[in-house]
Image (cartoon, rainbow, N blue to C red):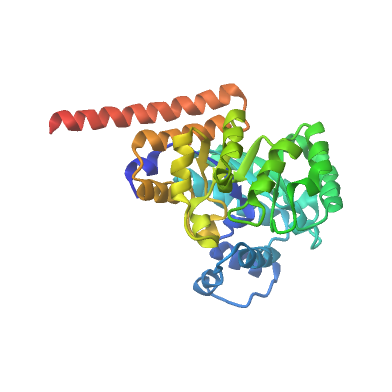
């Protein structure tokens, strides 16, 4: 990996905590909880992380969650991610979690969020990575189930910064959850939604996110560029797009680097993220490096991607400014080193 990318202060805005379940931890949790798996080695478990579409990915993704049973399981899962993020100089992360995938199989909401919350506190103390939680509703479940989950979250409102929508998009448009997101807005949550890549009715769904839901951010959203007016409106509103290049390459025809280039050229607030890194075998630094190589990005353009992310983070202005200052210090030091090398040459 390019050393500049490795050291770059990073902000991750599109990360599913269940998608960070590495095979080693999956096997450990299975043993801990007496869960039988169809394989016994790390290599076999990793080989099972194979798919060629969003639908095939989701099947294995939800099956793997069976090993997550107790509060310590969720704690270990999140703390392992934060340690790995720290090693890649992630300074701040906003982390999706899918409570319905757990409550539907009998794991209480309280167990899930307490484990995650405790890990976030320890992750900042031990590894210096600040993080916040975003509750995601499963769009292939009913709106009534989503509303019940929203109400169940309210006692923990101070631990959750916003709500999102993920899972299988086919036949599950944003407007299906309009009442749920309207209630979430009234409760003080910020709003985002997945608009997955190359799905049926992609641009119509993105339009619903803008006009029906009124989101504060869009996850994925690369198909917005299929409609110039839609892309222009996203730019006018200053909405961030949380693009995940490596996962794009697993579930579509490539990382969509050309779309990221066009977003940069249009001045859109595009950001680079890892999505489900244990499954796609690439955390945020690897995703940045893929884009760097595909587009031959300059250091200033890489800094711009991270500046976009910190600006789009759901943080107070003072906290954003502190991270942005750290980013600019790093960029300035890199420029100074580059200039010195030029003089030496």
- Where residue 156 appears, x then y in whole percent? 78, 39
- Where residue 297 appears, x then y in whole percent? 36, 41
Q: Specify whether 168 is left or right of 197.
A: right
Quarter of the figure that contains the C terminus: top left
Q: Residue furthest left?
A: 345
Q: Specify whether 272 is left or right of 208.
A: left
- The correct choice, above or below, for 183 with respect to 325 in the image is below
What residue is rendered at 59% in x and 59% in y? 21
- Where residue 159 appears, x then y in whole percent? 72, 38
- The correct choice, above or below, for 139 with respect to 227 in the image is below
What residue is rendered at 61% in x and 62% in y? 54
**Which residue is more in the foreground, 122 or 55?**
55
**Which residue is more in the foreground, 176 or 123?**
176
- Where residue 23 appears, x then y in whole percent? 55, 65
- The correct choice, above or below, for 144 with respect to 183 in the image is below
For the question of whether residue 89 can be seen, the reply is no
């Amino acid at each position: 990996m390019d050393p500049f990318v490795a050291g770059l202060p990073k902000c991750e805005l599109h990360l599913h905590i269940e998608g960070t379940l590495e095979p080693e931890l999956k096997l450990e949790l299975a043993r801990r909880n007496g869960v039988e798996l169809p394989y016994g080695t790390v290599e076999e478990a990793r080989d099972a992380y194979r798919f060629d579409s969003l639908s095939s990915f989701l099947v294995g993704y939800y099956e793997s969650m069976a090993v997550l049973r107790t509060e310590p399981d969720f704690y270990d899962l999140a703390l392992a991610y934060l340690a790995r993020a720290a090693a890649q100089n992630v300074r701040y992360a906003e982390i999706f979690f899918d409570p319905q995938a757990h409550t539907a199989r009998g794991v209480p909401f309280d167990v899930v969020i307490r484990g995650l919350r405790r890990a976030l506190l320890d992750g900042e103390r031990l590894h210096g990575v600040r993080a916040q939680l975003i509750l995601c509703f499963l769009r292939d479940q009913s709106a009534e189930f989503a509303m019940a989950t929203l109400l169940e979250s309210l006692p923990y409102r101070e631990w959750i910064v916003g709500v999102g929508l993920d899972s299988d998009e086919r036949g599950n448009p944003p407007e299906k959850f309009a009442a749920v997101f309207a209630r979430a807005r009234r409760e003080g949550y910020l709003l985002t939604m997945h608009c997955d890549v190359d799905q049926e009715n992609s641009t119509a769904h993105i339009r619903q996110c803008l006009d029906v839901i009124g989101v504060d951010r869009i996850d994925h959203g690369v198909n917005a560029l299929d409609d110039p007016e839609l892309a222009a409106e996203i730019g006018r509103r200053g909405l961030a797009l949380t693009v995940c290049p490596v996962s794009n390459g697993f579930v579509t025809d490539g990382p969509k680097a050309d779309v990221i280039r066009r977003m940069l050229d249009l001045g859109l607030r595009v950001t680079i993220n890892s999505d489900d890194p244990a499954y796609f075998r690439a955390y945020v630094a690897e995703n940045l490096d893929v884009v760097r190589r595909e587009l031959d990005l300059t250091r200033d353009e890489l800094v711009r991607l991270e500046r976009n992310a910190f600006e789009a983070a759901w943080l107070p202005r003072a906290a954003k400014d502190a991270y942005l200052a750290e980013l600019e210090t790093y960029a300035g030091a890199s420029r100074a080193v580059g200039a010195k090398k030029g003089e030496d040459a």
